[in-house]
Amino acid sequence: MKEKLSALIDGELQSDNLHAHLERLRADPELRGAWDTYHLIGDALRGQVGPRIADRVLDRLREEPTVLAPRPERSPSRRLGWYAMSAAASIAAVAFVVWTASPGWRAEPQLAGGPEAPATAAPVTLVSSSVAPAEIENYLLAHRPYSHTSAMQGIAPYGHSVAHERRAARE
Amino acid sequence: MTLPFASCVWRGIRIPLFLLQVSAAIAQTEPTALQWPQRIYAATEKLSYSGTFVYQQGQQVETSRITHVVEASGPRERLETLDGVPREIIRTGDEVVCYLPASLTVKIDKQPGRRPFPAILSEQLKDVSENYTIRKGEIERVGGYSCQVLALEPKDRMRYGHRLWADLNTGMLLKAKTFDEKNELLEQFAFTQIKIGGHIGRDQLKARYSRESRDWRVEDSGAKRANLAEAGWTIRSSPAGFRTVAELMRTMGGIGGVGHIVLSDGLAAISVFIEPATSRQPAPQPGLVRQGAVNVYMRPVGGYWVTVVGEAPAESVKYIANAVEYRK
C-alpha cells in the first residue's frame, strides 16, 4: 500500500486506482500519517519543512463555526464539462444536462405548489435529492435480498446496482 | 390397390390417436400458469448452474457471470461483474459478502428474515396469485433453451408487471422484463449463455478478492431480527396486497441502529429504513429518486429519516413512506 502511496504522490496512478487510494487514504489515519511523512521528506529535501500540516489544518477547522445547511449541489458546469469531454461527439447534449442533475437517479419532477396544486397551473421544477448514489447503494444492498423477484433470479439482481457504484466512483 | 388404401386409412386413424396420447401425457405433466412461479423458485434454489447474463436499464447495459452450486450444506453462489467497475458477491446460506475493490471495501450482510426454501412458498404464491394475473404465453428460445413465456399482470397500479421466460425442462428463469403502469419497459435481464446442471467446479465459487481484501475496510450490517412496533414504529396502512414480512435492526454505511421493515406482495418488495436524523448531517433533501424499476423516497419523521426503497411504482413507495408513524 505504501509504495502505491508514493506512486500517488508522484502522480503515477491510473484514475480508477486513484479514487480507491484516495478513499483509502481518507479512511486510514495510519496511511495519512505516512502520506504526511512522505510529503515532509519531500519538503525537507526541498528545504521547506512544515511538520504536522494535517493536524494543524484540522485544528483550524475545529475552530470554524459549524454551518447547518443543505449539502451544496454539485457544480453543474463542472459535471457538464466532464461529460462534454467524454462525449464530445454526442448530439444529445440536452439529455446529458438532464442526466447530470442527479446522475443515474432521476429526481421526480414535483409540482411547485405541492400535490394539491392543479397539474396545469404550477410550473414543474426538478427536485434533486441530495442523497449520494453511494448512499442509495447501501439501501439497495440491504433491500435486494428481500425482493422476491430477486429470489427468483438468485443473487443476479445484485449485479443491477453496479452502474451506481461506477458513478459513485467518479465523484 | 385396396391394401395400400386400407393401410392409409388405418395409419390415418393411428396418427391422430398417437397425437392424442402425447397431448394427454403433456396435459398431465405440463404445469399450469399458477404452478410456474413455484417451478421457477424451486429451480433457482435447487439447481446448480453457471452462466453469463446481461442486465439492461435504459441505455445502460451490464454483463455479469453467476455460478450457483447446491451442496449438502445448502446453496453457494458467486456473482462477478464483467464490465465496468469490478465487483464480486458471494452468498453462502443467508450470508452475503460483497467485495468492492474500487473502494477497497467488503460489505457483509446477513438475511435473518429470509426463510429457507420452501417455507416461503405457499403463502408467497398465494399473495402472487392475489395481486397478479398469471398467464402462459408462447414458447420462445433464450440462451439456446426453449422457454415458457409467463405474463404477470398487476391487478392494480400499486405494482409493476413482469414477463418471465423459464426453461421448459428445468423451470430455470432465463429472462425477465419489468414494465411500468404504461406498459413501458423499465428493466430486463437475460442469460446469454448458461449451463444448467452437470458438474460445476468448486473453483468457480472461489472469491477472487478473498486474499487481497484482508486489509480492506469491512462493513458488517450486523442485521438482527427486531420488534420495531415495540420501539414505537408503525406503518399506519400499506397499499393493498403488501404486508410486513421482516423487521430488523442493522448497521448501514457505518451508522448503527437503523430500523428496517420489509413489505411484500409476494413478488415485489419494499423496504422501509428508519435512522436517527443526527446520523445524517447535513440533512438530506426530502423527495423521490428513481432508477429503472427502483423508487427511493425520503422524508423526515420526528427526529428520524425514513427512506423507502422498492421495485414498485412511485405511488406505492410514497404511500408507505407517508404512512410511517412514530408513537411512544
Image (cartoon, grey):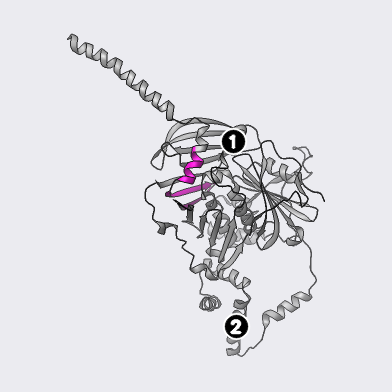
Residue in the image at 72% along x and 61% along y: A72
The numbered mark at residue B212 is none
Q: Is residue A68 above or below residue B179?
A: below
- Near-viewer residue (A25 or B328): B328
Q: Is residue B311 above or below residue B181?
A: below
Disc 1 sits on a residue from what chain? B
Q: Which amino acid, by three-letter code, is at mark 1?
A: Val
Q: Residues within 10 Å of mark 2 (few under 14, many from 20)?
A: some
Q: Residue furthest left?
A: B1
Left or right: residue A140 compared with residue B319: left
Magenta-tinted stretch: B39-64
- Res. B312 image quadrant: top right
Q: Are marks 1 and 2 on the same chain?
A: no
- Near-viewer residue (B285 or A72): B285
Quarter holding the C terminus of chain A is bottom right
Q: Give yes or no for residue B67 being in the magenta stretch.
A: no
The numbered mark at residue B128 is 1
Q: Which amino acid, by three-letter code, is at mark 2?
A: His
Left or right: residue B162 compared with residue A65: left
